[in-house]
Amino acid sequence: MKAGSNLEKVLTSGHFAVTGELGPPRGASVEAVEKKAGYLKGMVDSINVTDNQTSVVRMSSVAVCKLLVDMGLEPNLQMVCRDRNRIAMQSDLLGAYALGIRNVLCLSGDHNKFGDHPQSKNVFDVDSVQLISIVKKLRDEGKMLSGQECEGVPRFFIGAAANPFGDPFEFRVTRLAKKIDAGVDFIQTQCIYNMEKFRKYMHIAHEEGLTEKCYIMAGITPLKSVGMARYMAKFVPGLDVPDYYIERLKGVEKRKQAEEGIKIAVEQIQEIREMPGVAGIHLMAIEWEHKVPEIMEAAGLLPRPKVD
Amino acid sequence: MVVAERKPIEEILAMVADFKKVLLVGCKGCVTVCCAGGTKEVGILASALRIARKKAGNPLEVVEHTLERQCDPEYVDQLAPMIKENGFDAVLSMACSVGPQFIAKKYPIQVFPMLNTTFIGGALEHGVWAEFCQSCGNCIIHNFGGLCPIARCSKSLMNGPCGGSANKQCEVSPEIDCIWHLIYDRMVELGKVEKLRTVFPIKDWSTSRDGGPRKIVREDLKL
């Protein structure tokens, strides 16, 4: 065991793992965190806590992770390179570990231009691949980037993201390989809708032996409506929503679109389970956490395994 | 070159609102090349200021002058007789922001920047300039097919494109090329794409502005 987190235990014991996601509130409400977390309790193996996603100011991801630890849930701390330099990152990593956080997901971060403070100065001192190497150095060498030995070594299970649908497609598996070289243990992908392209990506990754070197979890975001599907297709760079899903949602009456969206997600999960090299799913029910139990039940992924 | 653009006329008029007589100084360096602060632009701005103030019933006298460069003291020194004898309320510099600072250091008179110094770049076509360098102080572009991910990737990524790269465009704007897509294409063209497979190490920013304001001392050139 590298970190001994529940996610690591589930993955290493060969179970099909499921992670969830919780977006912190735009405010200081503990109740808001507890409410969302309540829907995920017992449903997933670990909960990603986003780090000011879409560059909108939200409660600190470290703080929310700690609230989850206190609730007996396992958090996965998302950390982006946009807002912190290497000093703040290492400091937050040490603090996060001290608070009982055992998983960390290293990300570049959405550009601040998209958020609610587009006038802000961004950092990008290191990139996401380099951040992986920092977390690994802390864990495996017990040393900071400066060479300073840690008084108490933070042992994280190290994650990163991958987007099989970003361009250039030919470079996407290479980027995955770089993240593995840098020290990643698990990968969570961008939301998958184009199953054909994902299959192709996984095939190349599998052929290159990369699926033996890290756990790849496929990103699933259920579509709530045809409007959401259209928005994702049109306005989210690097997302690929094929027309047939849009047509399918359009084909059902409005009040039944959410149900249809869940049906699509469940079908995707079933298809993904059969793909060689996929170790689990990352279920991002964006502002739809209360639907997670229903999706998990329908996908036959309950109860979650208990691994000691 | 340093690429700059002139501030909006409203902002400039507000700066000079209390003045009766100003010296408008252009520069024959970079800002002449990028058509922001050379002799021609000095003439245009001087006319615009005179017309606006005349229209407002509060005339402004604008004396025009363009120096060889404003980033060398020997040229800035040439302003001494003009400033001494003409009773200017202020000097308006049309150089990059180095110019007004050199003038301010030399003369006990208020100095105002007429330009926004924008970036180190080049012309893509007539009338279009783009950023190419962030002056990080330790050039690494040979690792990326001669293209700079520090200045030209919105996130200064050193290990490949982020998830927002789509159709060769940056997620920040369709007007911005995804430099990582261009780097990839270029490395394929050069037959060196396998070099991008290696993790590029964490950059030392101490040579950049992060190490504090920088200075170059060339002992071999000092007099």
Image: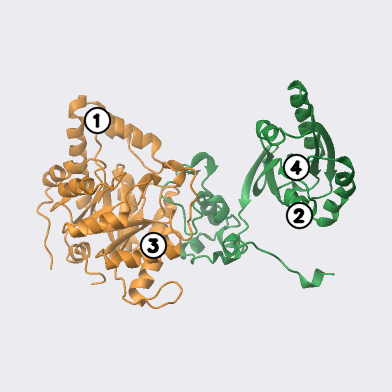
Chain colours: A orange, B green
Q: Residue furthest left?
A: A303
Point out which mark residue B94 bears: 4
Point out which mark residue A249 bears: 1
Three-letter code, disc 1: Leu
Q: Nearest to the eye among marks 1 and 4: give it.
A: 4
From the image, which quarter does the C terminus of chain A lie in? Answer: bottom left
Q: Residue at point 80% right, 72% down?
A: B220
Q: Give the SS element for disc 3.
A: helix
Three-letter code, disc 2: Lys
Subunit ID for the residue under disc 4: B
How far apart, in angstroms, are the residues tagged by discs 2 and 4?
16 Å
Subunit ID for the residue under disc 2: B
> Is B150 positioned to the left or the right of A70 in the image?
right
Three-letter code, disc 3: Lys
> Is B90 positioned to the left or the right of A80 in the image?
right
Residue B222 in picture, x, y percent from top left:
81, 69
Point out which mark residue B105 bears: 2
> Is B77 positioned to the left or the right of A85 in the image?
right
How far apart, in angstroms, are the residues tagged by discs 1 and 4?
58 Å
How far apart, in angstroms, are the residues tagged by discs 3 and 4?
48 Å
